[in-house]
Image: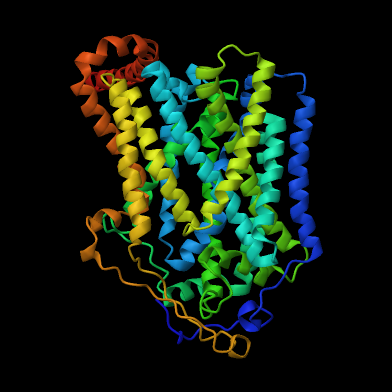
């Protein structure tokens, strides 16, 4: 919704973009900060490539020798999936809609509890390089290969998105060519990942997390100072309908509600931290299960801190542009470009600070892409190359082939960025992607772990059926684009002498739902995609397994024995502890009576 007549609110004087009609540009020293991050990250990769040149084993390349400290492992987990999209997407989400996203932080505790205490121990005890090795032990090699290929596709698209996002930001605020920045960042990341292996990835991620936090804190402090503090920003959000924070409607078409953000958030993030190759591979780099759990739990405060820093940045950014919407004014083309515009408006008067923020933004991208390249290369090597093509290969040759795979994957991600260029809002795209693929993946692993009667036919049906369902819903939602309630946008404080009569209209086009079959299905909130895919995988897999149990049981029971025994042992230990505690309580009560 838009209008040109806004409410009475503070007017910000100075050389801001809505006063001058121009975006401030980077200075040479700011480019130096950005270049330093690229150079230092590349140097870390080269250091570990040289330092570990005599350790030419796959275990060293993919698992860092299984002797890593939980601190860099935990920080690498944090950097792998969280910040790059949150940097741009969450502030843009608040500016475009409202502050409802604050509730998703509650889902993080549930995610870490279930992932660290239920899923990760099973993978750790198996000591797998690829988490999909579990599926071969439990079901069959074909199920393993199919699931691994789905993961490869998901991660190539995901890495392309997080490579494109900061390049888009750099293009918006500096005039750098979009594709020039994509190629330079992608090339540096691909080279240091291929040369240095997992250890280089973990330590570069650790360095980059601190750059990320520093850039967020600086922008937050300066932003709240310019706006006039929390109370002034809150008043602005109330005037523009962004202060909505307690939507309790349970209807699945409501884009963000308390229920979709907490429950849907759980099933959006659990596939990532519980059964995703990136996280499982990092957990196995730790020397003990206890340290792997410590690394996992470190993500709870880390994710929460980054979430709420970005949330507050969106909070103050919305107040700053209350009466001159950058999109209506032609200063930005989409909501994600408003974030770097805000950076240049509030930080450009202090040397190095704009460069620090963009360095943090690219640190996010470097961390995510390097983690993904190493993990996808591990899957291709273990699940496809060694399983089907080259079964007997020396460690040194296997490592060399893995490095080549990492280089080829980097090139594939660069090619995919041209497709990402045509996608919509970054945050919704990525969470939708994890829901579309992650929900079925979580359902497939859970089917094997917690449903002893499931078999390989049920697993095939579970994976393919749930993926088909989620892709149908996801593609339908992109094509139909159901309208959503947005905030109020104003242009009454845009400097007319700077913009002339070029102010635009920003309105929602109504959709004729009567002409679209099954329209209500496409209105499903993207926050429910993960849960929908998870339940679909379990239901389909269970039904098909029960129907085919007489045919498949003699074959699958032999394959399942070791894994089910390991799982049952863990469950029995938990049950025994609970029974002991209950008996103690009962005995105490009887004694008292």
Left or right, 57 with reference to 281: right
Image coordinates of residue 203 in percent, x first then y, are 69, 36
Residue found at x 55% / y 68%: 316
Closest to the observer: 151 or 240?
151
Question: Residue at 41% across / 39% down in the picture?
Answer: 438
- Which colour style is shown? rainbow
The answer, for residue 50, to whether it is visible in the render is yes
Task: Please state if 429 lies on the left or on the right of 579 as rendered.
Answer: right
x, y percentage for residue 389?
54, 18
543 up-or-down from 13: above or below: above
Instruction: Confirm whether residue 198 shows in the render.
Output: no
Residue placed furthest toward the front: 389
Question: For this view, does 470 lie left or right of residue 341?
Answer: left
What residue sits 49% from the left and 81% below the top?
A: 504
Q: Picture quarter containing residue 506? A: bottom left
In the rendered view of the protein, which quadrant contains the C terminus? top left
Determine which quarter of the picture holds residue 436.
top left
In this view, the residue in front, 518 or 95, is: 518
Whether 340 is drawn above or below 476: the answer is below
Residue 54 point in image, percent of width and height: 77, 19
Would you say 480 lies left or right of 501 here?
left
Q: Position of residue 552 (x, y in %)?
A: 26, 15
Quarter of the figure with the N terminus: bottom left
Q: Is residue 208 above or below residue 124?
A: below
Give whichever of 216, 428 is nearer the camera. Answer: 428
At 74% from the left edge and 35% from the top edge, which residue is drawn? 45
Q: How many numbered discs sit on the rendered protein?
A: 0
């Amino acid at each position: 919704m838009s209008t040109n007549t806004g409410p009475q609110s503070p007017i910000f004087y100075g050389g801001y973009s809505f006063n001058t009609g121009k975006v401030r540009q980077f200075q040479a020293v700011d480019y130096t900060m950005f270049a330093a991050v690229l150079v230092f990250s590349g140097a870390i990769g080269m250091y570990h490539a040289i330092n570990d040149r005599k350790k030419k084993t796959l275990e060293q390349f993919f698992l860092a020798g299984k002797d890593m400290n939980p601190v860099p492992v935990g920080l690498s987990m944090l950097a792998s999936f969280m910040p790059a999209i949150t940097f741009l997407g969450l502030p843009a989400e608040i500016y475009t809609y409202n502050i409802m996203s604050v509730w998703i932080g509650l889902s993080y505790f549930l995610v870490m509890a279930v992932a660290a205490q239920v899923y990760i121990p099973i993978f750790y005890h198996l000591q797998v390089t690829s988490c999909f090795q579990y599926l071969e032990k439990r079901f069959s090699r074909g199920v393993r290969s199919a699931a691994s290929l789905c993961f490869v596709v998901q991660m190539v698209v995901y890495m392309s998105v997080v490579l494109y996002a900061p390049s888009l930001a750099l293009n918006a605020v500096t005039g750098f060519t979009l594709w020039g920045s994509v190629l330079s960042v992608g090339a540096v990341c691909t080279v240091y990942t291929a040369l240095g292996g997992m250890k280089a990835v973990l330590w570069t991620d650790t360095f980059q997390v601190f750059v990320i936090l520093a850039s967020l804190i600086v922008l937050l402090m300066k932003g709240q100072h310019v706006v006039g503090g929390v109370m002034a920003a809150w008043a602005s959000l109330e005037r523009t309908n962004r202060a909505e924070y307690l939507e309790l409607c349970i209807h699945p078409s409501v884009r963000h509600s308390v229920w979709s953000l907490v429950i849907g958030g759980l099933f959006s993030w659990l596939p990532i931290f519980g059964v995703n190759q990136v996280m499982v591979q990092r957990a196995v780099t730790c020397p003990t299960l206890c340290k792997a759990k410590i690394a996992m739990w470190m993500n709870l405060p880390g994710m929460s801190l980054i979430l709420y820093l970005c949330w507050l940045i969106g909070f103050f950014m919305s107040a700053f542009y209350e009466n001159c919407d950058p999109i209506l004014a032609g200063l930005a083309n989409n909501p994600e470009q408003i974030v770097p515009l805000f950076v240049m408006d509030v930080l450009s008067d202090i040397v190095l600070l704009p460069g620090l923020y963009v360095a943090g933004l690219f640190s996010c991208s470097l961390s995510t892409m390097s983690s993904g390249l190493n993990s996808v290369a591990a899957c291709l090597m273990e699940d496809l190359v060694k399983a089907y093509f080259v079964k007997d290969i020396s460690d040194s040759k296997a490592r060399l082939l893995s490095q080549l795979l990492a280089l080829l994957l980097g090139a594939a991600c660069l090619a995919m960025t041209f497709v990402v260029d045509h996608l919509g809002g970054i945050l919704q795209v990525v969470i939708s992607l994890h829901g579309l693929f992650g929900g079925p993946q979580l359902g497939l692993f859970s089917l094997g772990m917690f449903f002893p009667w499931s078999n390989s036919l049920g697993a095939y049906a579970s994976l393919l059926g749930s993926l088909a369902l989620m892709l149908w819903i996801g593609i339908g939602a992109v094509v139909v684009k159901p309208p959503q309630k947005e905030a109020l946008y104003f242009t009454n404080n845009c400097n007319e002498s700077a913009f002339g009569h070029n102010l635009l209209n920003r309105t929602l086009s109504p959709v004729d739902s009567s002409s679209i079959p099954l329209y209500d299905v496409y209105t499903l909130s993207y926050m429910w995609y993960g849960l929908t895919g998870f339940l679909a995988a379990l239901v389909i897999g269970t039904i098909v397994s029960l129907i085919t149990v007489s045919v498949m049981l003699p074959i699958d029971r032999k394959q399942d024995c070791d894994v089910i025994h390991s799982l049952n042992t863990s469950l029995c230990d938990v049950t025994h502890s609970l029974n002991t505690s209950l008996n103690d309580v009962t005995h105490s009560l009887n004694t008292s009576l």
